[in-house]
Image: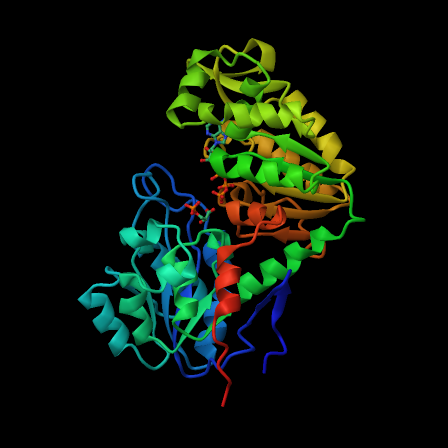
Amino acid sequence: MGIFLIKVGDLTIPTMDDIDIRSKKVLLRIDINSPVDENGKIIDDSRIKAHIGTIKELADKGNSIVLISHQGRPGDKDFISLEEHTKLISKYLDREVVFVEDVIGPYAREMIKKLENNGILLLDNIRLISEELIEAPPQQHVKTFLVRKLAPLFDVYVNDAFATSHRSQPSIVGFPLALPSAAGRVMEREVSALARIFNAEDTPKIFTLGGGKVHDTIRIIENLVRKRIADRILTGGLVAELFSVAKGINLNPKNMEILEKLGILSLIPRARKLLLSGAPIEIPVDYKVEINGNVMEEPASKITGVIKDIGSTTAEIYSSFIKDAKVVVLRGPMGVIEDERFKSGSKSVLKASLEGQGYVIIGGGHMISALDKDMKIDSSKVHISTGGGALLLFLSGERLPALEALSMSVVNSSD
Ligand SMILES: Nc1ncnc2c1ncn2[C@@H]1O[C@H](COP(=O)(O)OP(=O)(O)OP(=O)(O)O)[C@@H](O)[C@H]1O
Ligand SMILES: O=C(O)[C@H](O)COP(=O)(O)O
């Protein structure tokens, strides 16, 4: 036993080969948090597909499985139930998965107790439970209602949710202190692939960071700069707008109002400090904007429309940097990719990365959905991570709570 453990820094993490998982009742935490359109329809199911291998392997070993995941955040448009996700898992798994419209209530617990013979349940959105939104250490979360109500119903906990491994929330860090636990195959694959980029001789390393989670991303940029991991950081999305404003560029009141509403302007001092420190941060020289429904490109110094993507000149400059990189990490789209008109920035940097010579890591639900069917993906040099924020925190050398908790779990011996 214990010969497949994954080593991450000073952590030793059990894999599914290190604990006895046959004919057991397994609680499997996955991350099927997916981009949805304005009608709440899933527009990209790559994260759902990513977990099918782990679920199938556990089912083939005679286990009965209860799946848990979050979708979105309370208050956001994409905070929906997991009913549609259930149908997609059943489709790709080619097995019945029963949706349980409950999480820790009596109905859910009854369904779990009755589950047998290889059955598979998916509980509803775990963030319906308010405790799940609290960030705290494993020792505190093992005492939550969520963990205390569910853990006694299971033999084993498997965490396959690499994309949520940066959240110290009960469903991620509470169970390993209550049950024999292991990393799922997605978690195992992600950690092994991503560790590759820490070898020093692989330079230049270029990070292309965009999207809307600016509070997560600036923290990561600070880490990347402090630990000198990134040789160049190319910004897009709302991240680029923050750094443009921090550089003193006037983005016009309409864009400033958007940034204000999202609390992004409060990050200007930190962005300015990074720029003044000489951090290798690139910002767009032009943007693609929308004016009264029309799309046009404007130089960053003369923005009159609402910014929706990086401009074509910026895309060219970024692509030229990317082509010479030994390692390229992309997370967060360059524009509002839900709208076809604003996908070109993301597609340009993805295309340049896939055509370059470097090892490419692509992360983030929205960014992965920008991959075109006709983009050639050589799996020996491309790792499509299921992680967005988690990917970047890992890459910037931050410890991930999920890995810490798994390393604390009791690895039971197999009979
Ligand atoms: N210029 C922009 N203005 C407003 N929203 C933007 C802009 N550029 C990108 N976005 C939004 O960013 C969101 C994606 O950001 P996010 O940080 O979630 O990226 P991601 O790749 O999905 O990573 P993760 O998987 O961590 O969520 C999209 O909904 C997109 O519309
Ligand atoms: O999409 C992600 O990054 C993960 O699912 C985590 O989602 P969160 O940022 O809402 O915790």
Residue under the point 26% across and 76% down: 113
- Residue 120 horizontal side relative to residue 271, left or right: left
- Residue 361 horizontal side relative to residue 296, left or right: right
Which x, y percent locates residue 257? 40, 18
Residue under the point 77% across and 40% down: 204
Q: Is residue 398 above or below residue 341?
A: below
Residue under the point 66% across and 29% down: 281
- Residue 357 horizontal side relative to residue 8, left or right: right
Which x, y percent locates residue 95? 39, 70
Q: Is residue 115 above or below residue 193?
A: below
Q: Is residue 182 above or below residue 315?
A: below
31 or 273, which lies in front?
273
Among the 4 quarters of the image, the one containing residue 119? bottom left
Residue 233 visible in the displayed image = yes
145 or 117, which lies in front?
145
Residue 309 visible in the displayed image = no
